[in-house]
Amino acid sequence: MRLLIMGPPGAGKGTQATKIAEFFGIAHISTGDLFRANLSEGTALGLEAKKYMDAGEYVPDSVTNDMVRDRLTHADAQAGFLLDGYPRTVAQVAELDEMLGDETLDKVLVLTADTDEVVGRLLNRAHKQGRADDTEEVIRRRLEVYEEQTAPLIDLYSSRGILVSVDGLGSIDEVAGRIHAVLNA
């Protein structure tokens, strides 16, 4: 199974992606995790990504595309995967289509959530985890960037007939139940 999970920052994508990947026995490929791993290792890619992440901007497509292309070649992704945080732009969709060739995505899952709710979630996470990239100003900018650059993908994947939308508000188990219902339909 080849899946993509989308939604605004703070909608619960990471939490739900982990549960989905475990349930279906597929690789969870999170660009956020890939970026953080490169940051902690001090790689050139990580340092480049950090400049954009700290400002609440997306990492340039060229850096992200190369990272994802490499990750999709790993053995654990051959049986299936769940992309989390990629693609984020129409240009990245075209790049992903090229990477996948004839093996297209099976489903694109969009988590929806109220803006004030996700701002609150992310501020709470920032406090608990000491995440410097989650100030209110940066969070609101990330939400603006999502609307400008990523929201158009919803129409694109809808036109392909593979988009499913799920309310991302509620308990983790409630949201997971809604996700499993649409993925198993």
Image: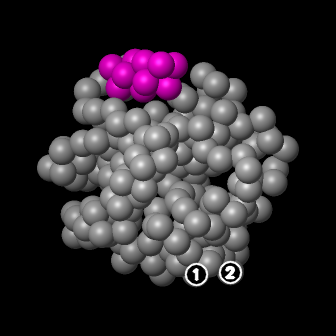
Q: Where residue 32 sits in the image (x, y, percent)?
A: 53, 57
- Residue 177 on the magenta segment: yes
Q: Residue at x 70, y 75 (%)?
A: 43
Residue 172 in view, yes or no = yes
The image quadrant where one finds the N terminus is top right
Q: Which residue is mark 2?
A: 44
Residue 14 in view, yes or no = no
- Residue 126 on the magenta segment: no
Q: Residue at x 61, y 44 (%)?
A: 105
How would you classify the magenta stretch by its main secondary structure? helix
**Residue pushed farthest left?**
116
Q: Is residue 11 above or below residue 26?
A: below
Residue type of the residue flagged with mark 2: Ala
Q: Where residue 156 sits in the image (x, y, percent)?
A: 42, 56
Total labels drawn: 2
Q: Tell me, yes or no, whether the two marked residues, 2 and 1, touch with CB atoms within 8 Å.
A: yes
Q: Which mark is residue 56?
A: none
93 and 58: which one is in front? 93
Residue type of the residue flagged with mark 1: Glu
Identify the image's colour scheme: rainbow, by chain, secondary structure or one colour.
one colour
Q: Is residue 1 above or below residue 101?
A: above
Q: Is residue 176 above or below residue 30?
A: above
**Figure quadrant of residue 99:** bottom right
| Label 1 crowd (10 A; few <14 / some 14-19 / many >=20) | some
Assign a secondary structure to mark 2. helix
Q: Residue at x 53, y 28 (%)?
A: 19
Q: Where residue 89 sits in the image (x, y, percent)?
A: 46, 67
Q: Residue at x 59, y 38 (%)?
A: 106
80 and 57: which one is in front? 80
Q: Which residue is mark 1?
A: 48
Question: In this rendering, would 69 be left or right of 86?
Answer: right
Over which residues does the magenta segment extend? 174-185
